[in-house]
Structure formats: structure tokens, C-alpha cells
Image (tube, helix red, strand yellow):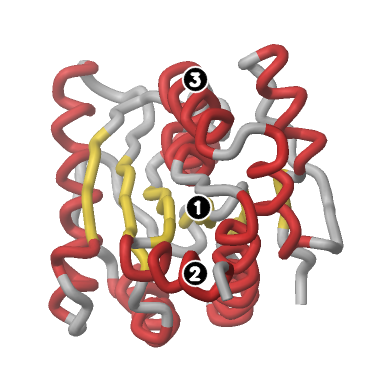
Amino acid sequence: MRKITVLSLSSLLVLVSFFTSCDSVKNANNTQKGAGIGVVAGGLIGGILGNNLGHGGNAALGAAIGAAVGGGTGALIGNKMDKQAREIDQALPGASVERVGEGIHLTLNENSVRFDTNKSTLTAQAKANLDKLVPVFNEYGDTDIQIFGYTDNTGKPEYNLTLSGQRAASVQAYLVAKGLKASRFKTSGLGIADPIATNDTPEGRAQNRRVEFSITANDKMVNDAKAQAGK
């Protein structure tokens, strides 16, 4: 299995200092990340990072970091997210899975969920790959999932913003039709923002037509972790 990318405490400190770096590093001690954030500043760091990454970098990554609780509660949440990230990676090896703070940043590129130019309709391949995520999302039902849709730079920005929102909504609708609770989801269309490849080639534009997920603990998971940490 591929080693899942992790944004560690040391990277978080760099981000706090510069607000521009979103480099991730490998860290074998994943379950300690939540506690580490709590020691440094807990939710304050998460909020600062989430705000700055969400507006100046990658929105899904920023959302995952911004949900940090910290302390012993964060460590317990981080442990559950470690397990979920591994299962996502096993279910869908073609996706990019990052463990950040106490959440998961998941990118479904053209090899996982592909969109044709000017289309928001899910292809048969996209549906098949989303099907692989459904059991994992069902197993970890105490999570909130934000879906961010993107486009390449073909067409007008206003059109692309609408199209990207439709892409995110298509993914949500499909997952809800498969039995996941609609209340777990939020969707956002970000148009041509946050490109992961050049828009100067057909291959690069195909990579930018994608969806990304931010997976974070919901209130129940947080409260359960607080109760467990207090024992």
C-alpha cells in the first residue's frame, strides 16, 4: 500500500510562521498529531491555518486543518482518521490521500472521478470509483464531508464557478443516492482556483477537472472523544 501523506506538527509550525507553505511530510506517529496541535495552540492554530490555506492555497486542505480540536481529544480523533485514511487508500489507490491535522484531504483526479470539458455528469468510471468509497464513508459515519469542485481554465470564470459547483453537487447526489446521509455533506464550487497541474496542455486541464474532499470529525465524534479523553 502507498504511504499516506501526512502534514505533521513541524509543518504546521512553518505554516503558522509564513502562512504560505502547504508542504507535507511523512510521519509515522500519525496519532500524535492532534495532541501536538493542542499543545501548541489547539483550535487557534487550526483556525488560522484553515483560514489562510482556504483563501490563499488549497480550500479542501485548509478546511481539514481548520477543524482541529487539539489535545487528548484531537489525538483520539487523529487515530480514527488514520484508520479511515488507510481504508480510503486501500479502496481507491488512484486517489491522493493526505492526513492533515485531525482530518483527511482527499483528491479525486481524472483517474478516479473524471469530468469531460464543460460537463458535470459523472462517467461510469467515476461512479464505479465513488462506489468504492461508500463502504468506508458508511463505516465512519461520525464525519462531515465537504466536497469542492474544480474546473480547468477553459471558458469564462463565472461559467466555470457554476460548473464546478455542479460537479461537487453531482458527487454529493450520487453518494446520497447510495445511502449516505445528506446532512453530512457540504459542497462548494471553486472554478479554476487551486490548479494542481498546468492548464497549458490537455493532460493538465484533465487533472484540474476534479473534486476534492475535506473529511473532518462531526460533533458526535468530537464529544465522544472528549468523554473518552476525560476518563
Residue 185 sits in quarter: bottom left
**What's under tag 2, amino acid-wise?**
Ala
Say which element carries label 3: helix
Dots 1, 3 in contact, CB < 8 A: no
Q: Nearer the viewer, mark 2 or mark 1?
A: 2
Is residue 127 toward the left or the right of residue 16 in the image?
Answer: left
| Marks 2/3: CA–CA distance | 27 Å
Residue 137 sits in quarter: bottom left
**What's under tag 3, amino acid-wise?**
Asn
In percent of the image, x 76 and y 23: which residue is there?
14
Image coordinates of residue 136 in percent, x first then y, are 44, 81
Image coordinates of residue 42 in percent, x first then y, are 58, 39
Using the image, tell me which numbered label, if any, was put on residue 107. 1
Q: Which mark sits nearer the N-terminus, 1 or 3?
A: 3
Residue on which the image places disc 2: 225
Say which element carries label 2: helix
Dots 2, 3 in contact, CB < 8 A: no
| Marks 1/3: CA–CA distance | 19 Å
Q: How many marks?
A: 3
> Are there few (<14), some (14-19), or many (20+) residues within 10 Å of tag 1?
many
> Are there few (<14), some (14-19), or many (20+) residues within 10 Å of tag 3?
many
Is residue 61 toward the left or the right of residue 124 in the image?
Answer: right
Which of the image's four quarters has the N terminus?
A: bottom right
**What's under tag 1, amino acid-wise?**
Thr
Q: Nearer the viewer, mark 1 or mark 3?
A: 3
Residue on which the image places disc 3: 52
Q: Visible in this render: residue 143?
A: yes
